[in-house]
Image (cartoon, grey):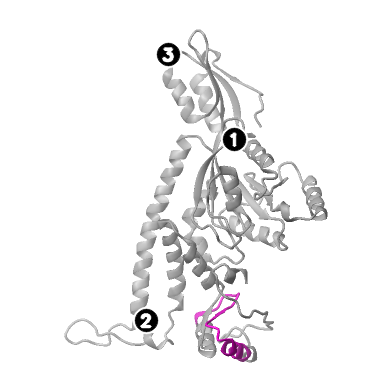
Amino acid sequence: MGLAQAIDLTIVQSGVVLLTEIRPATFIGTGKADEIAGLVKSLEAGLVVMDCALSPVQQRNLEKLWNAKVLDRTGLILEIFGQRAHTREGVLQVELAHLTYQKSRLVRSWTHLERQRGGFGFLGGPGETQIEADRRVIAERIARIETELESVKKRRALHRESRKRVPYPVAALVGYTNAGKSTLFNRLTRAEVLEADMLFATLDPTLRAVALPHGAKIILSDTVGFISDLPTMLVAAFRATLEEVTEADIILHVRDVSHEDTEAQRTDVQTILESLGIEASDRRIVEVWNKVDRLDAEARRRLDNSAARMSAQERPVAVSALTGEGIGALIEAIEHRLTQDRTVMRIVVAAEDGAGASWLHRHTEVLERHVETDGRVVMTVRADPANAALVRARFAQDGAVSDTARSLS
C-alpha cells in the first residue's frame, strides 16, 4: 500500500488474497477474481494494483474481467520512478526500464496489435503486423537510450578519475527507500535535497563535499533507495548510478530502526548490494541506525545493548537525521573508517622543490603545512597504501619522510 500512496493514488479498498496455487490465466482463483470484479464495479475504481509480478497474459485477462487498468508491482514502481526522475540521466534510466517492461507486455491478444500494414514494392504482401512494428520501434528506442547511457557511464568514469586525482574519498549512502538517506545527506552537507516521508523521494544521485573535523574532505553521494523485489530491469537500468556505490571508499547503509520490518529491509539491501559485487562482510560498510528519535525508552535500551555486543568493526552508529542526535559520532566513525588503512607521514620538502609540494597536494591528503626559517616546507600528509609507497619513493632521500603515530580520528 505504501507504493500506491507514494504516487498519490486514492486507495478506496485494500486486502490480502490467500493463494493455494498461482493460476496461469489470472494469477488468483476465479472466485476471488469475480469477487474483486464486483468490488471494482461498485467502488467505480479505475485502477487495480497487485503486489506481485503478473505475466502479460494475466494482466490482460484481469483487465478484461475487471474493466479497469491493472498494474503489478513492477509496473507501479516504474510509474513512481517515472514521476520522480528529473535529471537527463534519471529520465533515460527510467525510460529504458519502462520500455523493457513494455516490450514484454505486447501480446497478440490486444486487437489493435493484430492489424497488418502493407509491404514494400508493387506487389504489397502481408507486410508486418502492428505488434511487430511496435516491437521494432521499442527496440530501436532501447538501442538509442543504451547508447546515450553508455556515454553517461563514460562521463561518470571520467568524473571518478578526476576525483581520484583530487584525493577526496567518496562515501555513498545506501539503504531501503524511506530510510532517511536524503534527510541524513542534508544534515551532513547542509544541502537541500528533497526529503519527504514517502517511498523513492530521491531518484537522481547527488554529490556534495563534506569537511571532516580534522580538515579532510570527503564526497558524500546520495543514491536511489532500494526496495524488496526490486525489478531486475531497474537494477540494470540504474547500474550507471549504482556504480557510484561500487567505487565508493565507504558505504553508509542507512536503516530505519523504527520500522517493524527493519531486519527484512536490511536483508533486501544486502541482496541488492551482493548483486553489485559488494558482500555483507565488505569492510567499507558502516551501518547507520537512523530514526532513533521514534523509539521509546525500552526499545532504545535494547538497541544500544545490541550494538554494544557487536565487534568494533561491525558496530553500527545510532543517529537521528531529523534531530541531529549521533551525527558527531557518525562523522567520527566515517573519519576513523577512512583513515584506518592510511598512513600519516611527515614530509620535508626542499625550498626549491615546488613541484614536489604540488605533487603531494595531488596525491595525498595534506593535513598540515608550514615553512621553516630556511625555506623548507614541512607537510603532514595522509595517504592510502598505494600512494604512501609512492611518497616514500619520491621523498625518501636524505630522510625527508618519516611516519607518525599521530591519531586523527
Please state, as top left, top right, bottom left or bottom right, where the N terminus lies in the image. Answer: bottom right
Q: Residue at coordinates 52% horizontally, 82% vertically from top-left?
A: 46
In 3D space, how far apart are the residues under numbered discs 1 and 2 (Cα atoms)? 57 Å
Question: What residue span does the magenta drawing correspond to?
Answer: 33-56
Task: Name the outermost residue toward the top.
Answer: 374
Q: Give percent across and percent down for residue 55.
A: 53, 79
Helix, strand or loop at mark 3:
loop
Mark 3 surroundings within 10 Å by alpha-carbon count, few (fewer than 14), some (14 through 19), many (20 or more): few
Horizontal arrangement in the rendering, residue 309 relative to residue 199 (left or right): right
Marks counted in the figure total: 3
Mark before the other along the chain sequence, 1 or 2:
2
Name the residue carrying label 2. Answer: 131
Q: Nearer the viewer, residue 190 or 215?
A: 190
Mark 1 surroundings within 10 Å by alpha-carbon count, few (fewer than 14), some (14 through 19), many (20 or more): some
Mark before the other along the chain sequence, 3 or 1:
1
The answer to if 247 sits in the magenta stretch is no
Q: Are marks 1 and 2 in contact (CB under 8 Å)?
A: no
Query: Mark number for residue 212?
Result: 1
Q: Is residue 28 above or below residue 316?
A: below
Q: Give percent across and percent down for residue 73.
A: 56, 72
Mark before the other along the chain sequence, 2 or 3:
2
Name the residue carrying label 3. Answer: 352
Q: Residue at coordinates 42% horizontally, 65% vertically from top-left?
A: 95
Helix, strand or loop at mark 1:
loop
Q: Give percent across and percent down for residue 14.
A: 64, 79
**Given the image, on which type of amino acid does mark 3 rest?**
Glu
Q: Quadrant of residue 313?
A: top right
